[in-house]
Image: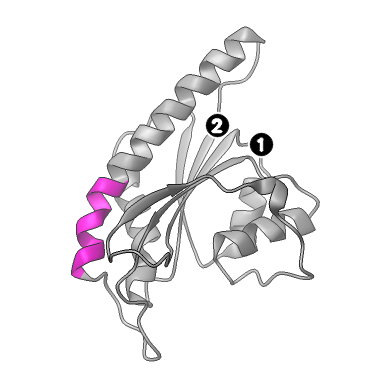
Amino acid sequence: MSRPPRILVAGIGNVFLGDDGFGVEVVARLAGRPQPEGVEVADFGIRGFDLAYALMDGYDCAILVDALSRGGSAGELFLLEPDLAQLESHGVADGHSMNPVAVLRLVKEFGGDPPELYVVGCEPASLGGEEGEMGLSEAVAVAVDPAVEMVEALAGRLLGRLEVGSEKR
């Protein structure tokens, strides 16, 4: 009998840099809601090393939640499926640099292979400037609940697919 599937939902970001706290806020809301068996929700904040080690801990899939600037409108949500085969190591990564690419490179440098990965992102309005700032902008704050729903729907689809796949083994 095979083990049940495991999915990590990881919020990343710095709450002292405005909208960079988006991922942290999303997982805080998710943590207050019941999740299906096998879905683990965690706030990694700016702890890159911790996230890298977690990604090597036998998860079938991981969903990273983060504010990422892609040139869209503030508060715009998107789903990315990074091509992990394109990931290269670039020397020693900074464990406090919490962009998803840096963390994935860190996993590779540790000799690991990240699980199947998705990024639920939100276009930030402000990342706090030089002085920093607490709290999300209005546009990003409005996107938190839809992001929670997006993550839960994605986790449900992934669990369903993984459970069907494990029955075929």
Quadrant of image for the C terminus: top right
Say whether residue 111 is left or right of residue 163.
right
Q: Position of residue 9 (x, y in %)?
A: 46, 44
The type of residue carrying mark 1 is: Gly
Determine if residue 17 is in view. Answer: yes
The answer to whether marks 2 and 1 mark residues whose Cβ atoms lie closer than 8 Å is yes
Q: Residue at x 63, y 47 (%)?
A: 83
Dot 1 lies on which element?
loop
Say whether residue 78 is left or right of residue 136.
right
Q: How crowded is mark 2: few (under 14 residues within 10 Å), some or many (20 or more)?
A: many
Q: Position of residue 138 (x, y in %)?
A: 18, 68
Q: Which residue is drawn at 22% across and 62% down?
A: 141
The image quarter containing residue 102 is bottom right
Is-magenta flag for residue 150? no
Q: Residues within 10 Å of mark 1 (few under 14, many from 20)?
A: some
Of the residues under marks 2 and 1, which one precedes in the sequence?
Answer: 2
Q: Which residue is denoted by mark 1 in the rendering?
A: 58
- Which residues make up the magenta segment? 138-147
Q: Which residue is denoted by mark 2 in the rendering?
A: 6
Q: Nearer the viewer, residue 144 or 95?
A: 144
